[in-house]
Image (spheres, rainbow, N blue to C red):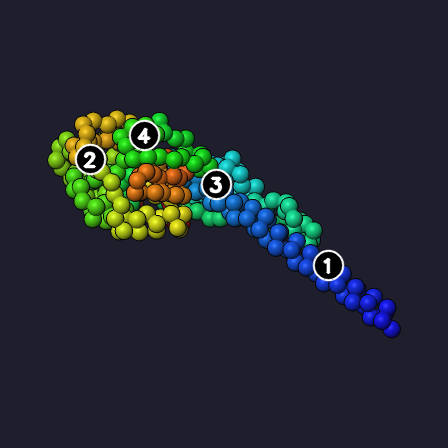
Amino acid sequence: MRNSYLRDERGMALTELALLLLALMGSLALVVDIGRAYAERWRMQNAADAAALAGTRALFLSGEAQALQVAADYAKRNGAKNATVTVDPTAQTVRVEAETDFPTFVATILGIDTLAADNPAKAIHGAVAEKAEEVYPIAVNVQNFQPDGRTLYDMYVGAQPGNFGWLSWNGTMSEGYLQLSLTEPGTSQDYINPVTGNNEPLAKDKWVWGRPGVANSIAVRDAIDYFQDHRIPITIVVWKEVRYSGSDAQYLVAGFAKFIITYYHLPGTNEIMGKFIQWVEPNAKITLDPSADFGVHGVKLTE
């Protein structure tokens, strides 16, 4: 009787162990394979974005048939196995749904051999009516990075290659204004050209005031925390030349890049770490109104 009880107890223990191992395998599948799924969705978003923008340019230059071909080609060249392209010549838009699938690593043990990932994007072509805000007051040197979205760059404050510098769009040097400029949607519409003294659209080959000194107020840290915690890509200035020093320092704009802040430490080291994603143009307001068409055209993602 006792031996039978022990055998039953051992059998129950083995069953419980098997169930525990199965649960652990399921958890591992969740960590490994779902993590891969998120990475693939990010890749499909990049593919859809590139395809929609390229297709919209082709729509304007060569018509609907070329837009369909170009958008599908860009999506596949950026990793999509399939691309559903919708072109609306009247609205001057191209929408792309980029799709892929990939084999699982662990979940195949549970009978799940493949997972799918997809993401959409839509772009519009039209006249550039006005520059929008959404450029943030951080400057890095043009020689400092390759925008591959993978490499981590550790930069310290200073007007030298390998460092970053704070900017002031209109020459105001207070931390309160810096905090405001770091808060969505930013204040780059305030930009005043130091050379002409005029309020102008922020653009390449224009000088921008640098902001010297330490920036470590709670408001500034809260503004940076928001971008870091939510992994929000922000558009920052890339400079190619610096002149003067202190509160008179100025940076010459070489272009603009998307940047994701992954870590920062302002007091003491004055350090920012992050990844550069891609070169960009500052967002612009696109219009189809013929009366607002002054010859400057552009494309913009709307989805």
Number of the label disc, if any, that sits on residue 18: 1
Quadrant of image for the N terminus: bottom right
Determine which residue is flagged by label 2.
209
Mark 3 surroundings: few (<14), some (14-19) or many (≥20) residues within 10 A: many
Quarter of the image for residue 264 reads top left
Callout 1 secondary element: helix
Gap between marks 2 and 4, in whole Å? 15 Å
Gap between marks 3 and 1, in whole Å? 42 Å
Which of discs 1 and 4 lies nearer the camera? The answer is 1
The answer to whether the residues at label 2 and label 1 have Cβ atoms under 8 Å apart is: no
What x and y, as percent, mark residue 133?
A: 26, 45
* Three-letter code, disc 4: Asn
Residue drawn at point x = 38 percent, y = 39 percent: 273
Gap between marks 3 and 4, in whole Å? 28 Å
Callout 3 secondary element: helix
First in residue order: circle 3 vs circle 2: 3
Determine which residue is flagged by label 3.
47
Does residue 14 show up?
yes
First in residue order: circle 1 vs circle 4: 1
Residue drawn at point x = 76 percent, y = 61 percent: 14
Which of discs 3 and 1 lies nearer the camera? The answer is 1
Does residue 125 show up?
no
* Three-letter code, disc 2: Trp
Which of discs 2 and 1 lies nearer the camera? The answer is 1
Number of the label disc, if any, that sits on residue 141: 4
For this orientation, the residue located farthest to the bottom is: 1
Residue drawn at point x = 40 percent, y = 47 percent: 231
Gap between marks 2 and 1, in whole Å? 66 Å
First in residue order: circle 3 vs circle 4: 3
